[in-house]
Image (cartoon, rainbow, N blue to C red):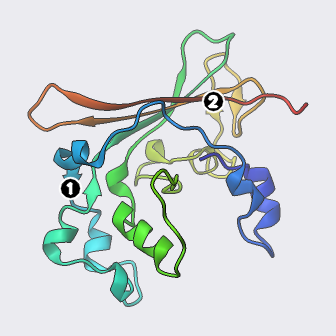
Amino acid sequence: DWSARDIQSWEYVPLGPFGAKNFHTTISPWVVPLAALEPARCAPPPAVADGSTGGDGPLPYLRMEPAQLARSAFSIELEVSLSRPEWQGELVVCRGNTRTLYWSVAQQLAHHAVTGCNLRPGDLIATGTISGPALESAGCLLERTWRGEWPLTMPDGSERTFLRDGDTVTMRGVVALPGCARRIGFGECVGTVLPVV
């Protein structure tokens, strides 16, 4: 799920996220069944479990029993890199993990459907930006560069705060199973920013 942050900053007031959020989608070539991810189940961040983010905690239809909550997240290692044809190799922009999601996938689906919105087999649902506690785990360039205040140095020495035409973004996800050399991969999601025609 790609966002056009320049359009998004203009849209937020008064519309909220709209056209900038459906800017582009890249889908991995592999489909991983939910059953294959069972060994990757884990507990969510503590703030989800104890409601320490403020308010009264999740609404009733999003609450889970302690045993459910303890296995409601998935530990999927994520990596996003940036490359260009003229560079040698690629620059890893961020590394994170889906276990840092505030809302579990089950909660996101429940919230999506609570108002009667249809869900059908094959529907594509995105989690939104997945960011961890460290700067290196910020899930988008806007966060990673602190709204453009801390540019990233590219392999050619240039500095960057946003994507440019010709940039290739590669997203990778993998489950490293505990105590096992076997890994479950999701394939690479690769997209290149092309100039406006």
Q: Hey, which quadrant is residue 177 in on the image? A: top left
126 lies left or right of 36? right
Furthest residue to the bottom? 56
Q: Secondary structure at mark 1?
A: strand
Question: How many marks can you see?
Answer: 2
Residue 157: percent from left, percent from top:
67, 19
Q: Hey, which quadrant is residue 144 in on the image? A: top right
Q: Which residue is mark 2?
A: 191
Residue 115: percent from left, percent from top:
52, 82
Q: Secondary structure at mark 2?
A: strand
Residue 21: percent from left, percent from top:
68, 56
Residue at 69% in and 53% down: 22
Structural crowding at the residue carrying mark 1, measured as other residues with C-alpha within 10 Å and reported as few (<14), some (14–19) or many (≥20): some
For residue 50, the mark is: none
Residue at 13% in and 38% down: 178
Residues 142 and 98: in front is 98
Residue 107: percent from left, percent from top:
37, 70
Is residue 57 at all visible to an observer of this figure? no
Image quarter hosting the C terminus: top right
Residues 39 and 83: in front is 39
The amino acid marked with disc number 2 is: Gly
Q: Which residue is mark 1?
A: 42
Note whether 102 is above or below 161 in the view shown. Answer: below
Residues 87 and 102: in front is 102
Q: Hey, which quadrant is residue 15 in on the image? A: bottom right
